[in-house]
Amino acid sequence: MKGFKRLLFWLVLLPYGVFSQAIDNALSYKTIGSKGYVRLNYENDFFSATDIYYTQGINLEWVSPVIHRFPLTKLLIVPFKTNTQYGIGIEHAGYTPTSISHDEVLLNDRPFTATLQLKTFSISVDTVAKRRFSSTLSTGVIGQAAGGMEMQTSIHRWLHNITPHGWPNQIHNDLALNYQIDYEQQLIRAGKVFSLDGDAIARIGTLSDKISVGSTVMVGYFDSPYGAKNHYKRKVNIYLYDHFQGDAIGYDATMNGGLFNHSSPYTLPAGAINRFVIENRAGFVIAWQNIYLEYFRTQITREFKNGMPHEWGGVQVVVGF
C-alpha cells in the first residue's frame, strides 16, 4: 500500500510541477474520431509470459480543445492549425533485467529503472494532402522518484507472485526531458477497407534520442484517419493493423543512465547499446459510437549486445466526447 500511495502522490503532483517513450499514440492506427477523449493504455510483458526488460507501461491521456490553453502547449509545433487536437497525459514505465530474483547486479544485463513523465502533445491533420504531424514534449523523472520498485512490488504482492529483488541497484534520479515530432503520409487507400501509410519520427532529449522510419498497413472497415475530427458517428469501425518500424538509436537513459547524475550503481556502457533496432506492432481494433477498444502485441529486436529479442502485449480503452 505504501508503494501505491507513493505512486498516487506522483500522479497528482507531476501535472502541476513537471512519458517512458515506449508508448506513442500519435500515429494513424491510433486515431480517435472525436474532438475530445480519455485514453487508457496498458502494456505488460506478461502477455508474452515473460517478466524482463520493458516489463510494464501505463499511460493515461486527456484530449480536449481546452488543453490549447495549457502553458506547455505554446512549445509545440503546430503546422495545421485548423484541424488540431491538444492533449496531456501521465505515463509510468518500468524496466528490469532478465531476472528479478537476485539482490546483486546482473552484469551485461539491462539495469533496473523506471520513468514517470507528463506528456503535452498536439496532433495536426491536413485533410486534403492526407498527412498528419504531431509534436510531443515529455517532462519528468527517471530513477527512484518514479516509484518503479514500489509499483512492481505492490503488483507482485497483489498477484501473490515472487517479491522482486535488485531494485536497490536501479538507475538513480535524473531529469527526463524529451521532444518528439512525428510525420505521417497516406500512400495508398482503397475505400474503407485498406490503407498504407509511411511515417518518420525524430526524438531528442535527456531520456531518449532516436530517428525512426516506418509503415502502417490497416485492413478492415474504418473511416479515414485523415478526416476532420467530429463527434463520433453511429457506426462500427473494425480493423487489423501492422506497424513496422526501424530505429536508429543515439542514447537511451533507461540503459545508459541519466545525462546529469552519474552516481547509479550500474548502467550499460554506450558501446553495449545496439544502434539499430527493429520494432513491429500488430493489433485489433473495434470502435462503436464513442468507445474504442484495442488489443495489440509488440516485438522488438535486441536493444543491447547481450540482450534478447523481447515481446509484450497491451490493451487500450478510449471514451470519446
Image (cartoon, rainbow, N blue to C red):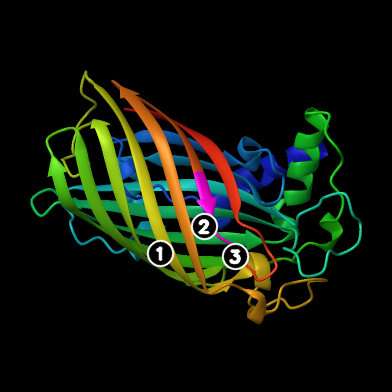
Three-letter amino acid code of the residue under disc 3:
Glu
Question: Picture coordinates of residue 192 (x, y %)?
Answer: 16, 33
* For the residues bearing labels 2 and 1, Cβ distance under 8 angstroms: yes
Name the secondary structure under disc 2: loop
Question: Picture coordinates of residue 312 (x, y %)?
Answer: 58, 44
Q: Please give left or right for residue 47 compared with residue 126 in the image.
A: right
Which residue is more in the foreground, 62 or 184? 184
Please report the residue visible at 78 percent of the width from the left and 45 percent of the height from the top.
150
N-terminal-most mark, 2 or 1 = 2
Q: Please give left or right for residue 82 compared with residue 199 in the image.
A: left
Which residue is more in the foreground, 10 or 310? 310
Three-letter amino acid code of the residue under disc 1:
Gln
Three-letter amino acid code of the residue under disc 2:
Gln
Question: Picture coordinates of residue 91 (x, y %)?
Answer: 55, 48
Of all residues, the one furthest to the right in this rendering is: 103
In which quadrant will I find the N terminus?
Answer: top right
Within 10 Å of disc 1 (Cα), the crowding (few <14, some 14-19, many 20+) is many
In the image, the segment drawn in magenta is: 298-302
Instruction: Identify the residue position indicated by label 3 in the image.
Output: 303
Please report the residue visible at 48 percent of the width from the left and 46 percent of the height from the top.
89
Of all residues, the one furthest to the bottom in this rendering is: 271
Q: Is residue 34 visible?
A: no
Please report the residue visible at 24 percent of the width from the left and 26 percent of the height from the top.
232
Instruction: Identify the residue position indicated by label 1 in the image.
Output: 180
Instruction: Identify the residue position indicated by label 2 in the image.
Output: 21
For the stretch drawn in magenta, what is the main secondary structure? strand
Question: Picture coordinates of residue 159 (x, y %)?
Answer: 78, 28
Within 10 Å of disc 3 (Cα), the crowding (few <14, some 14-19, many 20+) is many
